[in-house]
Image (cartoon, rainbow, N blue to C red):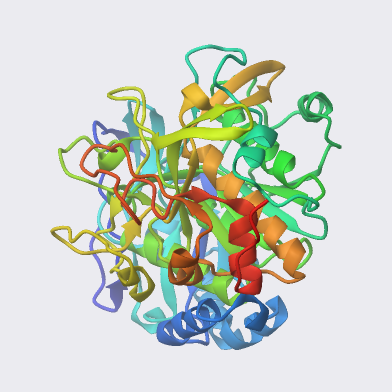
């Protein structure tokens, strides 16, 4: 499709077909779907970055986070920009189905033909080993009058964007070496007397679902009151159990059961969205700006190599994470389960996104063994080819943050943000006992570590009486004061663990009570 001279490409919107894809024909011109447009905010990128950085530099008790209403007024989209997009939609036969200034998002609905003309893209149907998708190649175009107003266009292409980062153990039922999440919390000395009450933990899911009967049975077996769980629909996503314990249901149940076991009195809001870049981004911005449930922590167990994302999507996610930092919302994300190449298979190291965003707490994986109620050993999780290993390495998208340069970060060929920041038990052989679709299973993967840390942070927030928010700068500044079990043995492929921070397990696994004391009082808890 030729592009008129009065149209410009949206920066970073270029797409290529998925590997091993082939075109099967044009998309039905009458097919209807929705597209989300991301608009600029009233705050410049530099101002938004400063809002987040200023919060992260302070002790938790000294932090003043913006309210969601205040953020919308100061940093949301303007009425004039929303009106400009609405006029564009009207001129191209598209309907406006939602406009959220806080999320800087306008959702348009229309036919494939109308969207193709509006954004000067040729939409084709593709077939690939994993199924089919509606796709495009090259950039998305917008009228020059919207240049700088519209900074991202999501939903024209609906290819699967992310994978869940969990691994099933080789045996179906709980066996020797596995743990309940309560066991893990005890081994990591999570603070006693706290249960997450008054906190809401958001969990993002891109498929599958949970069954209330499974939750009732699971928490009854743990001797814990069933937590309050609510499903939130985003972009037509729903709580839809597939009946396959090894499918996305496994991810959903692992996330809920780990969070619920660690912080049983917290409210758990599960945001279900389609597995596309649009669905993933809308789920994150919906959770961060949810003025009803007001989550203080977001847990993400899905992701993919940076190379599988468009630059516009990574930029949009990073800005959403900056907004979360300004609002006092901590985001935890799994660092990936395919070692240092993140499953790309090109012989080069890669890191997983969104964990590689510097405004997200990236969670890596370990192999944990116990001697009674104490940790016997902890090493890097790496079960070899086909068995899974913790992700970790250096971003090619985001530069090394100033706060991370305080620790000894190995100098890679292209210095970038180091992943992960923290770690926890992730080896399926020493994994978590869960219940999925009526079956007792043992799961591992860094998918278990993100909800584990999310639950721990909810306990910190309860103890402090306010959210700790953007934790990364403070964790690195306080590392000398303790709060971590340094994991110094093992490798994830290209990188090896060592003393202090490393690109396998980050700063280490949590010493929960000690870390809470370091973060919330500036001191260190007395040894028992």
Q: Is residue 187 left or right of residue 301?
A: right
Number of marks: 0
Question: Does residue 273 show up?
Answer: no
Classify 100 as above or below 36: below
Query: What percent of the width, then of the height, locates residue 397?
Result: 28, 62
Q: Quadrant of residue 516?
A: bottom right
Query: What percent of the width, then of the height, locates residue 462?
Result: 76, 62
Specify the farthest residue to the right.
225
Which residue is painted at 54% across and 69% down in the image? 470
**Which part of the image, by quadrant, shows the N terminus?**
bottom left
Which one is in front, 399 or 366?
A: 366
Q: Quadrant of residue 124?
A: top left
Which one is in front, 409 or 296?
A: 409
Q: Quadrant of residue 96?
A: bottom right
Which residue is painted at 41% across and 80% down in the image? 146
Classify 63 as above or below 106: below
Which one is in front, 424 or 150?
A: 424
Question: Does residue 265 show up?
Answer: yes
Which one is in front, 43 or 214?
A: 214
Classify 238 as above or below 281: above
Which residue is painted at 24% across and 59% down in the image? 396
Which residue is painted at 60% across and 74% down in the image? 522
Classify 261 as above or below 410: above
Query: What percent of the width, then of the height, locates residue 493?
Result: 24, 37
Query: What percent of the width, then of the height, locates residue 342?
Result: 30, 40
């Amino acid at each position: 499709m030729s592009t008129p001279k009065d149209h410009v490409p949206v920066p970073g919107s270029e797409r290529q077909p998925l590997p091993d894809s082939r075109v099967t024909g044009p998309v039905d011109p009458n097919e209807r779907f929705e597209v989300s447009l991301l608009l600029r905010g009233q705050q410049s990128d530099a101002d938004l970055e400063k809002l987040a950085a200023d919060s992260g530099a302070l002790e938790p008790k000294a932090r003043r986070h913006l309210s969601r209403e205040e953020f919308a007024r100061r940093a949301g989209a303007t009425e004039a920009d929303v009106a400009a997009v609405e006029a564009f939609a009207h001129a191209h036969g598209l309907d406006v189905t939602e406009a959220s200034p806080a999320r800087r998002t306008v959702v348009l609905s229309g036919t494939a033909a109308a969207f193709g003309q509006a954004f000067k893209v040729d939409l084709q149907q593709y077939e690939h080993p994993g199924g089919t998708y509606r796709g495009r190649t090259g950039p998305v175009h917008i009228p020059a009058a919207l240049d700088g107003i519209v900074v991202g266009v999501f939903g024209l292409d609906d290819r699967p964007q992310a994978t869940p980062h969990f691994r099933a153990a080789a045996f179906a039922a709980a066996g020797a070496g596995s743990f309940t999440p309560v066991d893990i919390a005890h081994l990591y000395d999570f603070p006693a007397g706290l249960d997450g009450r008054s906190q809401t933990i958001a969990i993002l899911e891109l498929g599958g679902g949970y069954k209330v009967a499974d939750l009732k049975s699971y928490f009854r077996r743990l001797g814990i009151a069933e937590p309050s769980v609510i499903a939130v629909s985003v972009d037509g996503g729903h709580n839809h159990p597939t009946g396959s314990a090894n499918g996305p249901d496994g991810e959903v149940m692992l996330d809920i059961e780990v969070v619920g076991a660690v912080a049983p009195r917290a409210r758990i809001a599960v945001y279900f969205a389609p597995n596309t870049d649009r669905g993933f981004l809308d789920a994150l911005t919906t959770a961060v700006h949810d003025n009803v449930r007001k989550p203080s922590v977001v847990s993400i167990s899905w992701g993919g190599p940076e190379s599988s994302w468009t630059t516009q999507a990574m930029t949009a996610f990073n800005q959403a994470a900056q907004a979360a930092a300004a609002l006092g919302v901590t985001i935890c994300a799994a660092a990936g389960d395919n070692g240092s190449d993140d499953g790309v298979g090109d012989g080069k190291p890669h890191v997983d996104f969104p964990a590689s965003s510097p405004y997200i707490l990236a969670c890596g994986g370990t192999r944990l063994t116990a001697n009674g109620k104490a940790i016997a050993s902890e090493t890097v999780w790496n079960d070899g080819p086909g068995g899974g290993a913790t992700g970790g390495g250096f971003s090619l998208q985001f530069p090394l943050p100033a706060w991370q340069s305080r620790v000894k970060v190995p100098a890679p060929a292209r210095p970038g943000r180091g992943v992960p920041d923290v770690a926890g038990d992730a080896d399926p052989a020493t994994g978590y006992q869960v219940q999925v679709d009526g079956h007792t299973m043992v799961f591992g993967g860094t998918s278990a570590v993100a909800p584990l840390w999310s639950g721990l942070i909810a306990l910190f927030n309860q103890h402090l009486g306010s959210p700790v928010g953007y934790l990364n700068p403070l964790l690195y500044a306080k590392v000398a004061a303790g709060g971590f079990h340094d994991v110094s043995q093992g490798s994830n492929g290209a990188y090896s663990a060592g003393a202090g921070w490393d690109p396998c397990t980050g700063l280490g696994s949590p010493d929960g009570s000690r870390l809470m004391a370091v973060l919330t009082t500036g001191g260190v808890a007395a040894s028992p």
